[in-house]
Structures are given as structure tokens and as C-alpha cells.
Image (tube, rainbow, N blue to C red):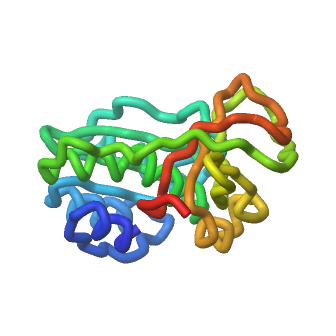
Amino acid sequence: MAAAVRLAGGEPVLLGIARDEREALRAKLVEGLRADALVTSAGVSVGDRDYVREVLADLEVRQVFWKIDARPGGPTAFAVRGATPVFSLPGNPVATLLIFDQLVRPALLRLGGRRTVLRPVVKATFQETLRRKAGRAGFVRLRLERRGDELLAFSAGPQDTGILRTSLRALGIAVVPASQGDLGPGTVLDVQLTSGELP
């Protein structure tokens, strides 16, 4: 995440890992709230030691929303204290990076004075079959190839959220609407370019 903050023009301050105890977490969050924006990872779900939202509330941070209708990244929260935005992301590394890219990166770019904050989007035709359950929006990490005038999309690898290698191979991310089930060959996708340029 620190590298992602730098790429968005920010200057990360690493707070380290907090133990799963309220007081240890409180000390880290108090320090983090001195920054222009605070980004946390993990501790935001419904486990018996997921204290982030509770401790933020104790620190008079106002929760704007908790949970998004997306897979991965469902237990994401957003809150504010004064002018300081607080993004509480899931603990799973892939989910964290995907949600950072969708929500935190644009906010940091805007805080830095940028007017264009969203990644460029292109149309690409999916060439494979990818099983997915409808009901939640999803993020599919893709490889892209150009053949003639057409842009083709392929899965960048296994889409399991524990596999970072797939993110490294991806040139783009398709945000698949909640109503969409399996993706088949010929499905036209809106793909956000994460590499900055087309193949």
C-alpha cells in the first residue's frame, strides 16, 4: 500500500502493525489521524477482534459507510474526522490493493490537486470462460492483447484473492456488474487500464 500511495503522489507514513487489542490499535490510529488521509488494512470485518471501526468511533471519526456490494472487498469502510478521510480496507492483500485502486487512489489524486483521477477505460472482448456468481460486482484482473483493430482480454491468472501473481500479470481490471454471471467468449468488457498503456 505504501508503494501504491507513492504512485498516487502521496508520501506514505508507515505506522506498523497493531496488535489485535483496542489500546494498541488506538495508539496507531491516533498517530495516523495526524496525516492528510489515513488508510488501514484488516480489522474491519465482523470477527471478534476486528476493532478498527469501534476504535475509530471512540476517536470521534464519523463513519460514512461500511460494506460495499463487491467481491472481493466487501467489508470496506469509509469515515471522516474533520477534513481527514479514513479508508478502512480488508486484510486480504489482493482485496486491499483492488479496493485501494478503486476508492483510495482517486481520492489521493484529488487531494493532490489532480482533476483527472480515474483510470482510462477501453472496450475489450473476453476470449475465455470465467465462472462467477451473480449478485455482487466483481473485479477481474486481465491480460490484454491487440489483434488488428480489436483488443482481446484474457484472465491474467487465477482470480482467487490470495494470488498476488495474477495482479502482477494484469494490464487491466474489468469491473463486472452485480447482474453479470459467468463471463464467456465474446463478452465485451469495460477495462480500466492499470499499466498506463495498451499492448
Q: Nearer the viewer, residue 143 or 138?
A: 143
Looking at the rendered image, the quarter that the C terminus falls into is bottom right
Left or right placement of residue 41 versus residue 133 in this view: left
Where residue 142 sits in the image (x, y, percent)?
Answer: 66, 56
Quadrant where the N terminus lies? bottom left
Instruction: Give the left or right position of residue 35, taking residue 51 as reference.
Output: left
Say which quarter of the image contains residue 6. bottom left
Instruction: Classify 146 as above or below 110.
Output: below
Residue under the point 65% across and 40% down: 138
Query: Residue farthest to the front?
Result: 148
Quadrant of the image occupied by residue 70? top right
Is residue 163 something that shows in the picture?
yes
Q: Is residue 150 left or right of residue 80?
A: right
From the viewer's perspective, is residue 89 above or below residue 17? above
Measured as percent of width and height from the top left, residue 105 is found at 34, 52
Q: Quadrant of residue 110?
A: top left
In percent of width and height, residue 169 lies at 63, 70
Q: Residue at x 31, y 67 (%)?
A: 7
User: Which residue is nearer to you in this view: 68 or 52?
Assistant: 68
* In the foreground, 48 or 119: 119
Task: Identify which residue is drawn at 58% across, 46% down.
Answer: 73
Is residue 42 visible in the rendered structure shown here? no
- In the picture, measured across the screen, residue 3 lies left or right of residue 6, that is right
Total of numbered circles in the picture?
0
Image spot of residue 182 (x, y percent): 84, 36
Residue at position x 50%, y 65% in the image = 20
